[in-house]
Image: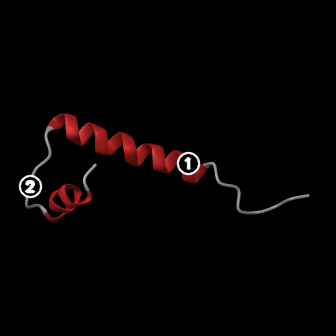
Amino acid sequence: MNPTLLSQYVQGRKKPSDAQTEKILLGIHQIGKELSEINLIHRP
């Protein structure tokens, strides 16, 4: 996604379509999933 367009959505200057909103939410969920799978503590 274009960073400028995403910034406009965040600032409320533009409103994403339903399809674009779905893409954004899927991306956020994917990032959350990846972060939840990170193991920061090494246990031998």
Amino acid type shown at disc 1: Glu
Give percent across and percent down for residue 3: 26, 59
SS under mark 1:
helix
Q: Which mark is residue 34?
A: 1
Residue under pointer 2: 14
Q: Earlier in the sequence, mark 1 or mark 2?
A: 2
Mark 1 vs 2: CB contact within 8 A: no
Amino acid type shown at disc 2: Lys
User: As drawn, is 36 to the left or to the right of 29?
Assistant: right
Q: Residues within 10 Å of mark 1 (few under 14, many from 20)?
A: few
Give percent across and percent down for residue 35: 56, 53
Which residue corresponds to the image point at 8% horizontal and 55% vertical from the top-left?
A: 14
Which residue corresponds to the image point at 11% horizontal and 61% vertical from the top-left?
A: 12
Q: Residue furthest right?
A: 44
> Relative to residue 42, is residue 21 depicted above or below?
above
Question: From mark 1 to mark 2, how far is it between C-alphas?
Answer: 29 Å
Give percent across and percent down for residue 31: 47, 50
> Relative to residue 20, is residue 5 depicted above or below?
below
Q: How is the structure coloured here? A: secondary structure
